[in-house]
Image (cartoon, rainbow, N blue to C red):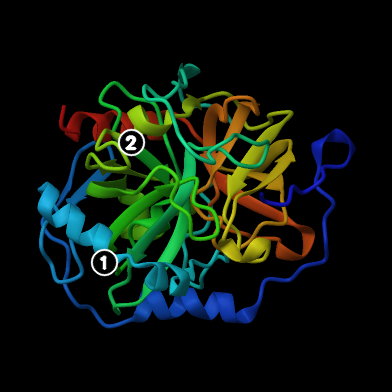
């Protein structure tokens, strides 16, 4: 069972004077500047600011059928998963600054309702405040051939195949490439895969992240093959969080979930609870002492600790104020709804 971080009054975590290690920043720099191996093409962009690519193995093969998806699953041995580097949460040099956009929604408020799984779980898969079956760890291969990991969560949709994470957990950003061997392990804990694993079919992200490393748009959605212990779709297997957009920058209470290396070595889920506020541009900020490895984890409104479901209204992006125990995420407005619709439209039935 993961250790829970005890929130203080008003929902804040006790904030330590933790400084994220320089080695973590170096890890991301090495990922971004590593020599290219197999570029995952073709990549397709559309007029609404979204870009997609077929998911690939590290030797460049498109993961378009179950046979290749099972090869990717077999590639991620316990040893490779244990040696994967938790992707840095620090803002790298050269990343695009926040835009000057006013702190207000760009359209009407909207939401997608969360959904429960359609199959009964077995084994040790209970829900805790800081441990949701819908949230998991993702593993991928960097262009230099090394293994890396982030956090992510399944999100409800009609086709039941979507997993939401940060843009920098699927693509390196400006001048970079897509990651390969992309796999989602829901409710991973200390090497255990209680629901099995799911391999990506396609990856989608906001074009502003891919072209400019814009943290205003650091969001992505993977489309998954059938998989897991029952050979079903990911949302059928574990359920899916809902999603909200244009709900304002100041939310009284958010629960963030992820797999931080600084708490538990990235081997189990941890949580933070805090209100949010405007962090500049199209970004929001909350108090949290999770660091690298928690990238891509969901920020949830109305989190229900009885079923592990809530409404995603941002994802963990980066830390501008590590000494203050804070991190930032992209504000969910019409851009995330556009990406969600784009990914759902690309999903197989």
Neighbours of disc 1 within 10 Å: few (<14), some (14-19), many (20+):
few
Q: Quadrant of residue 319?
A: bottom right
Do labels 1 and 2 touch, CB within 8 Å?
no
Q: Quadrant of residue 343?
A: top left
Q: Which mark is residue 58?
A: none
Q: Nearer the viewer, residue 95 or 309?
A: 309
Q: On the rendered structure, is 349 left or right of 200?
A: left
Q: Is residue 243 above or below residue 65?
A: above
Write the residue at 48% across / 50% down: 296
Residue 247 visible in image: yes
Q: Nearer the viewer, residue 43 or 307?
A: 307
Residue 28 rendering spot, x and y as whole percentages: 47, 73
Neighbours of disc 2 within 10 Å: few (<14), some (14-19), many (20+):
many
Q: Nearer the viewer, residue 47 or 7?
A: 7
Write the residue at 67% across / 51% down: 2
Residue 213 rendering spot, x and y as whole percentages: 40, 59
Q: Which mark is residue 75?
A: 1
Q: On the rendered structure, is 1 left or right of 55?
A: right
Q: Which residue is mark 2?
A: 234
Q: Is residue 50 above or below residue 325?
A: above
Write the residue at 32% across / 71% down: 142
- SS of the residue under disc 1: helix
The furthest residue to the front:
123
- SS of the residue under disc 2: helix
Comes first in the chain, label 1 or label 2:
1
| Distance Cα–Cα, label 1 vs label 2 | 20 Å
Residue 31 rendering spot, x and y as whole percentages: 39, 75
Write the residue at 38% across / 28% down: 337
């Amino acid at each position: 069972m993961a250790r829970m971080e005890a929130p203080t009054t008003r929902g804040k975590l006790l904030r330590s004077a933790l400084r994220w290690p320089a080695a973590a920043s170096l890890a991301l720099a090495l990922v971004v500047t590593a020599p290219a191996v197999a570029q995952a093409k073709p990549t397709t962009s559309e007029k609404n600011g979204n870009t997609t690519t077929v998911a690939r193995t590290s030797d460049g093969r498109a993961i378009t059928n179950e046979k290749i998806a099972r090869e990717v699953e077999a590639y991620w041995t316990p040893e490779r998963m244990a040696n994967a580097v938790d992707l840095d949460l620090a803002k790298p040099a050269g990343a695009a600054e926040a835009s000057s956009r006013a702190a207000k929604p760009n359209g009407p408020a909207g939401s997608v309702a969360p959904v429960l799984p359609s199959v009964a779980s077995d084994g040790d898969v209970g829900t805790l405040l800081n441990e949701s079956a819908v949230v998991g760890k993702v593993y991928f291969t960097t262009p230099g051939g090394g293994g890396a990991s982030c956090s992510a969560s399944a999100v409800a949709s009609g086709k039941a195949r979507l997993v939401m994470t940060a843009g920098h957990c699927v693509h390196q950003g400006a001048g970079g490439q897509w990651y390969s061997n992309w796999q989602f392990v829901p409710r991973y804990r200390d090497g255990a895969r209680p629901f099995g694993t799911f391999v990506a079919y396609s990856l989608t992200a906001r074009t502003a992240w891919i072209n400019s490393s814009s943290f205003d748009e650091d969001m992505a959605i993977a489309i998954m093959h059938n998989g897991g212990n029952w050979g079903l779709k990911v949302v059928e297997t574990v359920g899916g969080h809902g999603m909200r957009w244009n709900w304002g920058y100041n939310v009284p209470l958010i629960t963030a979930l992820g797999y931080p290396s600084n708490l538990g070595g990235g081997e189990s889920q941890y949580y933070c609870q805090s209100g949010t506020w405007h962090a500049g541009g199209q970004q929001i900020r909350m108090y949290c002492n999770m660091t690298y490895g928690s990238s891509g984890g969901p920020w949830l409104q109305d989190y229900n600790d009885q079923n592990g479901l809530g409404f995603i209204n941002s994802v963990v992006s980066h830390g501008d104020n590590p000494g203050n125990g804070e991190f930032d995420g992209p504000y969910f407005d019409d851009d995330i709804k556009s990406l969600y619709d784009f990914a759902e439209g690309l999903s197989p039935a």
